[in-house]
Every structure is written in C-alpha cells, then in structure tokens.
Image (cartoon, rainbow, N blue to C red):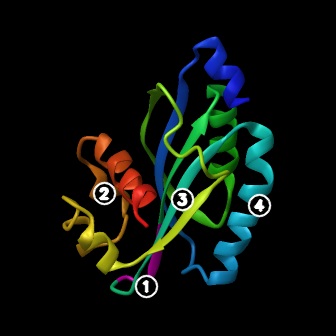
Amino acid sequence: MAAELAAKGAAMHYLVYVSQAVKPMSVADLDAILAQSRANNPALGVTGLLLYRYSPDTDSGHFIQCLEGEETAVRTLYETIARDRRHHTKLVLDRGEAAARMFGDWAMGFKNIDDRALAAAPGFARIGEASFAPERFQQPHGKALELLKIFFDAP
C-alpha cells in the first residue's frame, strides 16, 4: 500500500495522540497491545510508534502514539483505539500530511520509557518531570511528533 501511495504522489496522513491507561500496564498487557497492532496494522497499511511511560509519582501509565498511512485507514484505526477501554482521556495532539512515512520500518514500533530516557531527549527534560498527561501537551503540537521521532531514531 505504501508503494501505491508513493506512486500516486499521495502524502502520508499522520495522527498523534496521548492517553492515560486505566491501570498501570504490565509487560504482558503491553505485549498484548503490540501483538494486536502488529497483526492488524500491515493489512491496513498503517505504521507508527507507541511510547508508554509509567509514572511512579501518580501510579499511572500514559501513552503517546503516532499512526501513519492512508487518511481513511488512520482515522478508522484511531476511532477503534479511542473506543478501547484500556485507556481514557484521549487527546489528539496533531494530525496532518507528511511527504513520506516517518516510522515505516515498523507495523508498530514500541518503547517503554522511563524518566532517565525522557531527560536524555534533547529539549524534553520538562516532560520527564511528569507523566504524558494531556494537560502537559498544551504547547505547539509539533513537539509531540518531535519527541516520537527522537525515540524512533534512538538505538
């Protein structure tokens, strides 16, 4: 599907959102989410990156995710994700068009990050002081996409 879109000159649609897990996620919980994503996303032509962070300060977990692909597929997948009862307080931070896939190597890339990893991300030390709570993202939306790209490019 990506090759077909590129051949037509179509841009990739992307959507970035944050949400809060209903409960802190175990490794098994996260593995289940990834298995489902990696099984379903290739058929939809969707790629992306999912970050999860557990905050011991609030005993809660938060997600930030970028989905990319054909616009209808991304919107439909996000609607499914938004109905998922494993998380709440969903907030779309950014959406738009990109010339090419940003996370094309993964049906769904994933990183479980901690304070140290966030503090090491250039320009994002402030986010490392708290969770991915939606109110923390009341700034230019491009910052969320930049954060995801940093973790995509990291070893």
Q: Mark 3 or mark 1: which is in front?
A: 3
- Horizontal side of 150 relative to 35 (left or right) equals left
| Residue matched to label 1 | 59
Kind of residue indicated by mark 2 = Glu
Tell me residue 80's x, y (percent). 70, 47
Judge depth for marks 4 and 2 and give the one in front.
4
Q: Quadrant of residue 76?
A: top right
Q: CA distance from mark 3 to mark 2?
A: 19 Å
In the rendered structure, which segment of residues is drawn in magenta?
A: 58-62
Question: Please, what is the three-letter code of the amino acid marked with disc 3?
Answer: Leu
* SS type, badge 2: helix
User: Which residue is labeled 3 in the image?
Assistant: 50
Label 1 and label 2: CA atoms lie apart by: 17 Å
Picture coordinates of residue 131 (x, y %)?
Answer: 35, 71
The x, y position of residue 43, in whole percent, is: 81, 41
Please rate how many residues cluster around mark 4, counting C-alpha atoms within 10 Å: few if below 14, some from 14 to 19, many from 20. Answer: few
Circle 3: element type:
strand
Q: Nearer the viewer, residue 9 or 127?
A: 9
Q: Magenta stretch containing residue 132, yes or no?
A: no
